[in-house]
Image (tube, rainbow, N blue to C red):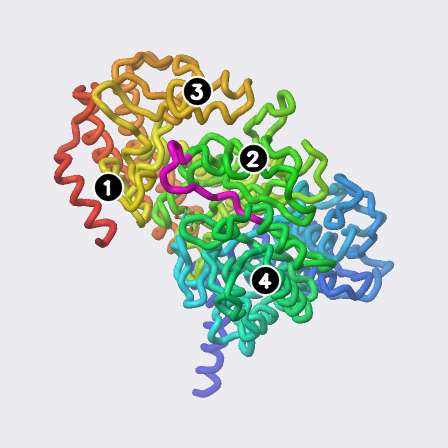
């Protein structure tokens, strides 16, 4: 009897993993058995051992990860040897600081994967390089590529590839939609949640090498000895994965926790306090990355409180870092109340400071001039501060893009910004070249993504949100990758390898961002979302703490037309761009429709190049956008046999919410703007079945007011 029960238990344990639904925890690092027996046999014969040349900590991580990956993919353990076995074929991992890899010779993170004799050599310029090479090799197997005869090399185009967590000490995440913060401050430093390691693995697999672990609206608490011990423990988990820890700092920390009466950056005691704090941090965390700062923005304190400039503030912190190998990332997300056009604020404050920042300072600029809207023109500071390295900041968390219920693949948004041509040094002066430092020959370069990660079992809330984390890392490494290539990799590693389903899912992902723009903010509308929570439509919002927190400030609907005139006859924000860009966007007749209402107030009856009037085009986009969600639902339904059942059901349900909310957006916006245009809903579309008053009540319903 006992024997029988034991046997039954054994059988159950053996088959259990197949029965358990895919909860998404493993992200794109599933390492499931390669289904194709022929391919598996090829991989097995090429990977009979792993040899590791050296004992560098990150190199060791690389070997361990490779073993883990191969064990899963090949269904058998692969032994780790001190040196290659002459009679077998295997994978040899080694560090060679002068390895011949693509990219700049100063780059220590590059790798080469090459076949040599019987073996595959993965050579990195450093342990991290080998780790990135190992993940690249595993990706080949995960996506079903041939691995014999490989000869590829790669190195990152951008040096500091950062995730910014907007996590608070109390476990909440500002603008986080995937549960709570993954950092368990009450447990640190004694207990290290295994999740930290899986987080590090996921980041390393896409080349992320730095994480700012706390909210830019920072608590001073992180700089206390008590918290630094906890941060040190986290840094210890991330270090073997080539990831450095950074802290967002609260400008007034010298007052709040230092007992000083001022936080003036020119005050000797303040300078001394920060220098001592930096020394203290480095004594605990020798590879500490540096500081991220939001100052004099949205109520945060900063150097301007003492009549000092952003440069004076940033440089003081850079000096405090002294000889330590750290940097200051100073955010340019500023907009004072009362400005004529928020669009111009950051430019007006920061452009004059170009050339004044110390060499350790990078200025971190959001992709667009307002605030992570579904589509923005590129920020006019890109190209305008040639003497300052600029970090591009994008939002991976979908604050303005449907949070965790809308499927919106963000690589097209990121790429639209990276590919935008500032034309500041002639054609081809793309944002990407500003950011990677090549346009102005900067020694340092950075890119930051605001994380969408939380304690939800699948990390990102929406299962498809994982693709945005993945895409950010891949583009940070190499912004020339296409969004389609990235979506295909991710889908194959995460959802299915069945070719037709891969093609379908990638197609839906590729179109999803444009669809979202169509049913929320077509033709260059922006900032018409719900107040505070930033979810759902609220174009009628006219009263808020500040005019530039309302919707009417941005869309400027009146009986004549719609849109913000930012030409010379309006706020003239357009003048912040180079002449070529001004020319492209300056004329309402020729301005690309995606940016039209960003720069022009256009008459309702104005004909557009599509052959429709502005009003008819606007209504058409809202209707076709919402209908495209039905298309997404249908396409997703077709992949059912190829993807995990639980995951399929989850995405199906979220798409149903997305459809409901796309209709909410559509009805709210067409009914509201109709009160100005006085035009009927154009054929073939049926007018909304509900009234504007009815739709307005939905804000309370869905926003849980
Ligand atoms: C806005 C968010 C706010 C952030 C701010 C920032 O709504 O929560 O603090 O960006 O980037 O979009 O500092």
Using the rendered view, name the quadrant where residue 231 is placed: bottom right
330 shown above or below 197: above
515 shown above or below 312: above
Q: Position of residue 389 (x, y in %)?
A: 64, 41
Q: Which residue is mark 1?
A: 543
Q: Nearer the viewer, mark 2 or mark 3?
A: 2
Q: Which residue is mark 3?
A: 592
Q: Nearer the viewer, mark 2 or mark 4?
A: 4
Label 3 CA crowd tier, 10 Å (few <14, some 14–19, many 20+): some
| Magenta residues (range) | 330-342
Magenta stretch: helix, strand or loop mostly: loop
180 shown above or below 372: below
Q: Which residue is mark 2?
A: 351
> Who's the residue at 49% across and 51% down the image?
295
> Are dots 2 and 3 in contact, CB under 8 Å?
no
Q: CA distance from mark 1 to mark 2?
A: 31 Å
Taking the magenta stretch, the answer to whether it contains residue 340 is: yes
Q: Which residue is mark 4?
A: 270
């Amino acid at each position: 009897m006992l024997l029988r029960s034991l046997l039954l238990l054994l059988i159950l344990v053996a088959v259990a993993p197949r029965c358990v639904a895919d909860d998404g925890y493993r992200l794109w690092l599933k390492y499931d058995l390669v289904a194709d027996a022929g391919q598996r046999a090829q991989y097995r014969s090429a990977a009979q051992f792993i040899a590791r040349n050296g004992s560098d900590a990150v190199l060791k991580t690389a070997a361990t990860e490779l073993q883990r990956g191969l064990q899963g993919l090949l269904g058998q353990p692969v032994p780790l040897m001190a040196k290659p076995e002459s009679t077998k074929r295997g994978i040899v991992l080694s560090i060679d600081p002068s390895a011949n890899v693509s990219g700049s010779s100063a780059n220590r993170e590059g790798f080469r994967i090459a076949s040599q004799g019987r073996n595959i050599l993965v050579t990195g310029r450093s342990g991290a390089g080998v780790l990135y090479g190992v993940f690249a090799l595993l990706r080949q197997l995960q996506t079903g590529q041939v691995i014999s005869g490989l000869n590829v090399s790669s190195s990152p185009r951008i040096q500091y590839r950062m995730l910014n967590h907007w996590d608070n000490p109390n476990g909440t995440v500002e603008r986080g939609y995937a549960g709570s913060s993954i950092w368990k401050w009450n447990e640190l430093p004694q207990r290290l949640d295994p999740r930290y390691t899986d987080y590090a693995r996921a980041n390393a697999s896409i080349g992320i090498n730095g994480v700012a672990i706390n909210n830019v609206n920072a608590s001073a608490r992180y700089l206390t000895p008590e918290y630094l011990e906890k941060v040190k423990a986290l840094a210890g988990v991330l270090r073997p994965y080539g990831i450095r820890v950074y802290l967002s700092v609260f400008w007034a920390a010298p007052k709040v926790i230092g007992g000083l009466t001022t936080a003036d950056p020119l005050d000797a005691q303040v300078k001394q306090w920060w220098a001592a704090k930096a020394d203290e941090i480095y004594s605990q965390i020798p590879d500490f990355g540096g500081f991220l700062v939001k100052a004099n923005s949205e109520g945060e304190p900063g150097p301007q409180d003492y009549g000092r400039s952003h440069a004076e503030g940033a440089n003081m912190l850079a000096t405090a870092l002294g000889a330590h190998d750290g940097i200051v990332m100073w955010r340019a997300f500023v907009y004072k109340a009362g400005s004529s056009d928020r669009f111009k604020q950051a430019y007006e404050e920061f452009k004059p400071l170009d050339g004044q920042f110390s060499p350790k300072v990078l200025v971190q600029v959001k992709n667009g001039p307002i605030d992570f809207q579904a589509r923005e023109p590129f920020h006019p500071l890109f190209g305008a501060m040639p003497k300052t390295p600029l970090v591009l900041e994008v939002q991976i968390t979908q604050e303005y893009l449907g949070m965790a219920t809308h499927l919106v693949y963000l690589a097209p948004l990121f790429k639209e910004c990276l590919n935008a041509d500032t034309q500041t040094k002639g054609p081809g002066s793309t944002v990407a070249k500003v950011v990677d430092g090549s346009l102005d020959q900067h020694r340092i370069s950075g890119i930051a993504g605001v994380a969408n990660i939380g304690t939800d079992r699948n990390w990102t809330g929406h299962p498809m949100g994982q693709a945005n984390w993945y895409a950010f890392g891949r583009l940070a490494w190499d912004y020339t990758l296409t969004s389609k290539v990235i979506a295909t990799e991710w889908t194959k590693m995460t959802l299915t390898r069945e070719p037709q389903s891969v093609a379908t899912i990638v197609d839906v992902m590729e179109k999803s961002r444009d669809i979202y723009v169509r049913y929320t903010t077509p033709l260059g509308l922006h900032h018409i979302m719900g107040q505070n929570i930033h979810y759902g439509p609220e174009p009628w919002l006219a009263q808020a703490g500040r005019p530039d927190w309302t919707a009417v400030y941005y869309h400027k609907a009146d009986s004549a037309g719609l849109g913000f005139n930012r030409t010379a006859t309006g706020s003239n924000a357009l003048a912040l761009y180079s002449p070529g860009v001004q020319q492209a966007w300056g004329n309402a007749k020729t301005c690309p429709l995606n940016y039209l209402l960003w720069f022009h107030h256009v008459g309702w009856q104005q004909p557009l190049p599509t052959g429709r009037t502005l009003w008819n085009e606007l209504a058409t986009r809202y209707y076709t956008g919402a209908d495209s969600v039905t298309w997404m639902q249908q396409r997703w339904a077709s992949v059912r046999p190829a993807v995990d059942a639980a995951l399929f059901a989850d995405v199906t349900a979220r798409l149903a919410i997305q459809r409901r909310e796309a209709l909410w957006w559509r009805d709210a916006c067409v009914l509201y703007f109709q009160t100005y245009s006085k035009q009927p809903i154009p054929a073939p579309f049926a007018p909304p079945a509900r009234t504007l008053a009815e739709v307005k009540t939905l804000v309370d319903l869905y926003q849980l007011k």
